[in-house]
Amino acid sequence: MVERVEIASAQKAQYEQDGYTILKGLFDPDECDRFIDHMMDLHDGREKLDGFQFADAMSFALRNADDWSRTRNQHLFDPMAMAWMLDPRLRQSLRTCLDDEPDAMSTMYFYKGSEQRRHQDAFHVPGCVSAWIALQNVDERNGSIHIQPGSHRGPILDKEDLREDADGVRGPWYGWDGEDAFDALFERNGFPEIAVEAAKGDTVLIHGRLIHRGGPILEPDSFRHVLACHYIPYSLNPWLYEVAPRMRFSFDGASRFTPTH
Ligand SMILES: O=C(O)CCC(=O)C(=O)O
Ligand SMILES: [Fe+2]
């Protein structure tokens, strides 16, 4: 296994300019197939894993047999998801993007495309970068991701912007539905949206402030196996997030809780 994969300078420039870049073929097709098989075995009950019965390792919402929705934070109970999240081949590129040692703090496994509406991951996880790992070919058939290149250099939407503070002062987006607000931000930016397609084993690095969405799915119900992992800078303290577990994992194997203030 390659221990250090340095991000090429052209990719670093693209990440800075456009807010994303693709690490082609970072993972081997065989590795991807093994992970997909594991996920299908879990879904079909051929393999048991305590915790998998919950679609969400934070809220403990129960999955039912026909549920193909994403799993959340599977790394908390699944050593295989943990190993993917902390694969050494991701480390150097993430370090370059974050300008710090990366700490992993969330995972989402998508069996199928999400058609999730526009958002910035930083709304939920300030300061983050995401590694969006295609375990199979992803295109408009099974739902590519749509992004607005350059939007990471534009305004960011904060949860506070939608709220009233303790003194009753309303944020600039008070009264807006969060998803509508992201559409409006997208329109105001005024630059185009593109579809990002990926081949099996490719990893798309996505800046936390980049506006993106799960693109339309031309073939309904088709599989689109993707693991998305979110990382924050090691030195980012205190814990800023409302709904994420406070456990963070470093590539050297250390894990720690972050103080909340
Ligand atoms: O894969 C998708 O459809 C959306 C993924 C996403 O928004 C994310 O990983 O942050
Ligand atoms: Fe996202």
Image (spheres, helix red, strand yellow):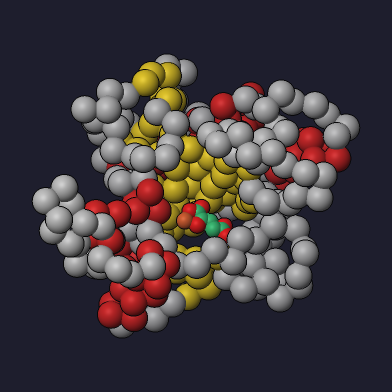
Q: Report which quarter residue 206 is drawn in.
A: bottom left
Residue 226 or 258: which is nearer the viewer?
A: 258
Which residue is drawn at the image coordinates 53% and 40% (left, top)?
107
| 41 sits to left or right of 131 | right
Q: Nearer the viewer, residue 90 or 139?
A: 139
At x 40% / y 53%, what residue is drawn? 121
Q: In the shown orientation, is residue 251 left or right of residue 72? A: left
Which quadrant of the figure has residue 176? bottom left
**Percent coordinates x, y for residue 212 in the rendering:** 44, 65
How far across and down, in percent of the image, does residue 62 sit? 69, 38
Rendered position, 172 above or below 254: below
Left or right: 45 as drawn, with respect to 33:
right
Quadrant, the C terminus:
top left
Q: Position of residue 166 (x, y in %)?
A: 16, 47
Q: Nearer the viewer, residue 167 or 220?
A: 167
Q: Residue at x 38, y 68 (%)?
A: 177
Name the residue at 81% across, 50% down: 66
- Kindly tell me whether residue 246 is visible in this rendering: yes
Taking 176 as reference, is 243 above or below it? above
Classify the position of the N terminus by image quarter.
top right
Q: Is residue 111 left or right of residue 169?
A: right
Compared to 177, does 65 lie above or below? Answer: above
Tally of numbered discs: 0
Report x, y in % for residue 246. Answer: 40, 28
Q: Nearer the viewer, residue 186 or 85?
A: 186
Instruction: Judge whether residue 96 can be spotted in this image.
Output: no
